[in-house]
Amino acid sequence: MLKFGEIIAKHKKLILILALILIIPALIGMKATRINYDILVYLPDEVETIQGEKILSEEFNMGSFSIIIVEDMKTKDIQKLENKIKELDNVEKVVGASDIIGCNIPVEMLPEDLTSKIYKDGETAILVTFKESISSDETMKSIEELRSSTDKQCKISGMSATVLDTRDLSNSEIVIYVVIAVALCIGILLLALDSYIAPIFLLLNIGIAILYNMGTNIFLGEISYVTKAISAVLQLGVTMDFAIFLYHSYKEEKARFSSNEEAMAHAISKTLVSVVGSSLTTIAGFLALCSMNLTLGKDIGIVMAKGVLLGVISVVTILPSMLLVFDSWIEKTSHKEILPKFERIKNFNVKHYKAILVVFVLILPFAIYGYTNTEVYYNLDKSLPDTLLSVQANDTLKEKFNMVSTEMALVGKDVPNYKVNEMLEKIEELDGIEWTMSFSKIAGSELPEEILSDDIKSIFENDKYQLIIINSNYELATDELNEQVVKVNEIIKQYDENAMLAGEGPLMKDLVEISDHDFSSVTITSTVIIFIIMIFVLKSISLPVILMLVIEFAIFINMGFATYTNTTLPFIASIVIGTIQLGATIDYAILITTKYIRFKQEGKDKKQAVSEALGTSISSIVVSGLCFFGATFGVGAYSKIEMIGSLCTLMSRGAIISMISVIMVLPAFLILLDKLICKTTIGMRQLGQS
């Protein structure tokens, strides 16, 4: 390790030059990495609903669809608009009243059952189908072209429009996220460090590591907008303590060695030993997200694990080079550390450890209750502001046409029309079903089949399948809609055992079921992996249990806040926050514990060992916790996308709760269970109770 440190110190200028050069390919890679804004893309391929979506795309050329709501427009003008829309490259079909019955039949002559689905209070609904998928670049471009080619009389609804608005809103906010995080971290570091300019170098170092991380995402092909939005601030918050550790170590070594290079070599050696061990738990926590069936977890997990690894590498290579090259600047801008030593808190915790444990026991059941009763939502529209055009269009569909969620049934072409109509009658008898539509139903209405265009027939039928559109007035991802989807599925399979459902409603039902499973699997996976790592790091059976209990207690409180404040969380936040908080803050507990072990081995009694371990760790933990808080709090407060805002709020609050829990509760457990710890920890068995 020392040899490695000597090489870094010797070639400091070369390393800085290489680091700056590598920013160029990182920026190119970051620019070339596609960002996905559709969460439903991360559902597993084997899910029947996803298979249904593929059939819609491949067999009906319907990768996605939108409904355009036209307000107070004459029939001839609507026809002109439809013709204009048909000219767009990615548009497959445009279906309005004129496409069904032509322009020569007055609206008054149409069956009321049909007109109620198309006309309402002067507004007309037009169905537009796209060749490409919901979140493809082509479909996004098509929605933009639709908006630019129509006027304020037209509203464009559908998931593709929602994805587009999510993209634009996310891209408009992401720079602000970084600015807020950097500003808050600088303020915290100015209090914690002894130089006015040192915080700049620490942040520059992490900034370079973030660019490397974002640039290397090109090897993944694409990442989600959630990953893009949180990865920078999360990497900043999680890896800042590595940089602080190296800086403090360098300052200590400078007092021992006359040469800055020699001092840095020893600082790098010490940092590597400490940081590599502690970063393993953080990396493991993020990689545990890869166990999610919803592959968004894999997306976040790989990017963040890679970010932590690159953060460690930059801390022991780029940061030392910066500190050595600009050492004179740092010395010229030095000042006294403003952050207190927290002596009173340390003494209070050791003296009143029994009272702290009593408070822990009293709070624990309330924390568990809050954690287990947290309510979540899955409807992605709810995470977006009401001012977005897509949200307003979707609301109009709900209010005027009672089109809240859509289900699409695919049944075999060989099922006769009378059977299809019989099936539709059963479906329409279900609570919450507003209407159904199929070619057999349109052809069986008062309209003669001969006047129906071939385009209409091609939308609903091909040589293999018949497409049935089912409109529900139940909200997406609710228990009512999920139960309705199950019943619809049962009915269609009575007529065709190979029939399947697709569309928004069934997709969201699968998302709910898979996410509920992921919540349990991710929690168990991360806990087991980190527990095993700690057994090897601490060489103990009892200490990992104690540390996990302390951090899980903090997680319970963090999640429980939502229950007691009547806050409903977006589903993805509830799944990943426990793993992120565990992986990112378990290091606080490991720091105190390793020092406690060392002081016990030096012959100190349990209270002395805990007191000195806490006294020498509390400042580092507070700074690390505050940096994690600063990196995420501003984003949580600022973001208009609730999916991102809630996640960052949970992370910032979790950092503070974990910090307090480790400083207050962990020392109490170490004192109380000292005898057990000594008996179950390698290297401490001979110490016994002292």
Image (tube, rainbow, N blue to C red):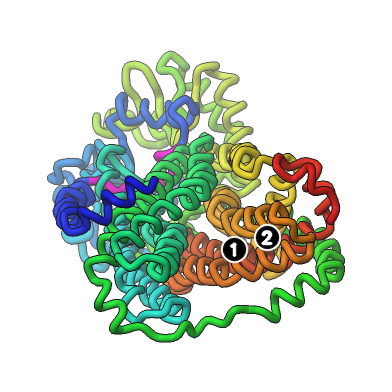
Residue at point 21%, 50% (across, down): 26
* Sequence order check, earlier mark of 2 and 1: 2
Side of 133 where 285 appears, left or right: right
Looking at the image, which residue is at 59% across and 57% down?
591
Name the one closer to the observer, 440 or 671: 671
Mark 1 belongs to which amino acid? Answer: Gly
Specify few, some or many for label 2: CA neighbours under 10 Å numbering under 14, 14-19, or 20 or more: many
Magenta-drawn stretch contains 112: no
Query: Magenta stretch?
Result: 33-42
Q: Which of 38 and 253 is in front in this view?
A: 253
| In this picture, residue 88 sits left or right of residue 202 | left
- Check disc 2 and give the amino acid type: Ala
* Residue 378 visible at all: no
**Quarter holding residue 124:** bottom left
SS class of the residue under badge 1? helix
Q: Nearer the viewer, residue 44 or 535?
A: 535
What label does residue 666 carry, if any?
A: none
| Label 2–label 1 contact, CB within 8 A | yes
Work out which residue is located at the far top of the displayed protein and give it.
414
Q: Residues within 10 Å of mark 1 (few under 14, many from 20)?
A: many
Q: Name the residue under label 1.
A: 654
- Quadrant where the N terminus is found in the figure: top left
Above or below, comparing residue 220 to residue 11 in the picture: above
Q: Mark 2 points at which residue?
A: 554
State the SS at label 2.
helix
Residue 93 visible from this viewpoint: yes
Q: Disc 2 to disc 1, how far (Cα)? A: 7 Å
Q: Where is residue 328 in the image (x, y as percent from the top left)?
A: 25, 76
Q: Locate residue 363, reporting x and y percent.
A: 80, 65
Q: Residue at x 59, y 79 (%)?
A: 341
| Residue 658 at x, y percent in the picture | 63, 63
